[in-house]
Amino acid sequence: MTEFKDATAIVGIGQTEFAKSLDGSETELACRAVLAALDDAGIDPSEVDALGSFTLETTAEYELARACGLGEIVHFAQVPYGGGAACATVGQVAMAVAAGVANVGVAWRSRKRGARRARNWSQVAERIEGLGKYSRPYGLVRPVDEVAMLARRYMHQYGASRDHLANIALACRTHANRNPNAFMYERTLSREQYMQARWISEPLCLFDNCLESDGALAAVIVRADRARDCAQPPAFIHAYSQGLSRQHQVMVDYHSDDPLHGCSWPAARNLWRQADFGPDDVQVAQFYDAFTPLILLSLEAYGFCGVGEAAAFTENGALELGGRLPINTSGGGLSEAYIHGMNLVTEGVRQIRGTSTAQVEDANVSLVTSAAAVPTGALLLRGDA
């Protein structure tokens, strides 16, 4: 049996700029990010033989391989569920590399969502089908509406307040203000501004929502024995998991015994089962943050606090540099860019390299998660021993 733990590493990361609207197609953006990641790793494109992407990706593997001058591809796979896919996209490529099926893998996500016409829920009539027919006609039209229901349940059950959601939004914005590549780099946010912002879906205001961004990111994965010879310090993939809870319904868990106990829980249990580390050893985390309440659910699922304790966990600057657990140190989906969580993966790598613009001192264990509201995944990255 091939041991997966620490058998592979992310050795190259690349990205385009992030903006409300970028020139070029999603394929062009994907190629730029992939070639930048390979250049970062010091690996020739002709060596790539494995690819991983999202089912939502519009660029076919053969298009990317041909345009970037990649080698013969012997492994390719796609992961569904949008925001739940980034960690699994990397993890599945890593499994192929660890097993010896492939030698050099690339995982990528390219996205053009700044334009309203690119947002699938702007075409409401097209979504009244399947399970949606039981919820969308009654007002749960957008993902924010669905998560707002979970947020209200959490606030009612555990006494969380908008101040706790503000703690999350402000931490992410503070980190983005250090990051020149962040969409919100020069846009500060105060608690007063947060409280006065317009509602999007009560109790969630404008600043509880992620950005809608254009951009692309990529990561290069190789086996550990090669990783140490690459151009950049390796971020070893110590553990990886996906998670799908027994009673799940996509984007919501309203029909389960506990709507707040979603897919992150099985992902977390399996992640820690594999690992030599536990939550107390994690120095920095990149939690999927399409909406602020997802951070509360993730803090509990991954064991950083008890059930119902996440709101209090966010207090006293705990999520900022110097705090108990700095999170989303590039600004995350709330304040850097929203590329379905791939920018959380690349920021997790930067923390291990020591090159983040909001660097946690001596960070050697970095957690990255995908969305808490859908079938999901997680990565535990570490530096060289």
Image (tube, grey):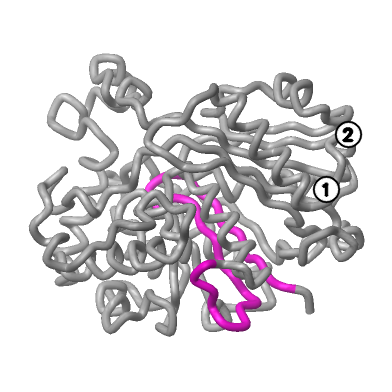
Give the left or right position of residue 44, taking residue 374 as reference: right
* Quadrant of the snapshot with the N terminus: bottom right
On residue 49, which mark appears? none
* Quadrant of the snapshot with the C terminus: bottom right
Query: At x 90% / y 47%, what residue is drawn?
Result: 100
Pick the front one: 381 or 213 = 213
Query: At x 24% / y 20%, what residue is drawn?
Result: 124
Q: Residues within 10 Å of mark 2 (few under 14, many from 20)?
A: some
Q: In the rendered image, is residue 262 in sight?
A: no
Q: Residues within 10 Å of mark 1 (few under 14, many from 20)?
A: many
Q: Which residue is denoted by mark 1 in the rendering?
A: 97
On residue 46, which mark appears? 2
In the rendered structure, which amino acid carries the disc numbered 1? Val
Q: In the rendered image, is residue 274 in sight?
A: yes
In the rendered structure, which amino acid carries the disc numbered 2? Ser
- Say which of marks 2 and 1 sits in front: 2
Provide the residue span drawn in magenta. Answer: 357-383
Q: In the rendering, at what x and y percent does residue 108 appear?
A: 63, 39
The image shows residue 329, relative to residue 65, as above or below, that is below
Query: At x 75% / y 51%, what residue is drawn?
Result: 40
Pick the front one: 12 or 204 = 12
Q: Alpha-carbon distance for marks 2 and 1?
A: 16 Å
Pick the front one: 123 or 198 = 198
Sequence-wise first label, 2 or 1: 2
Helix, strand or loop status at disc 2: helix
Pick the front one: 380 or 209 = 209
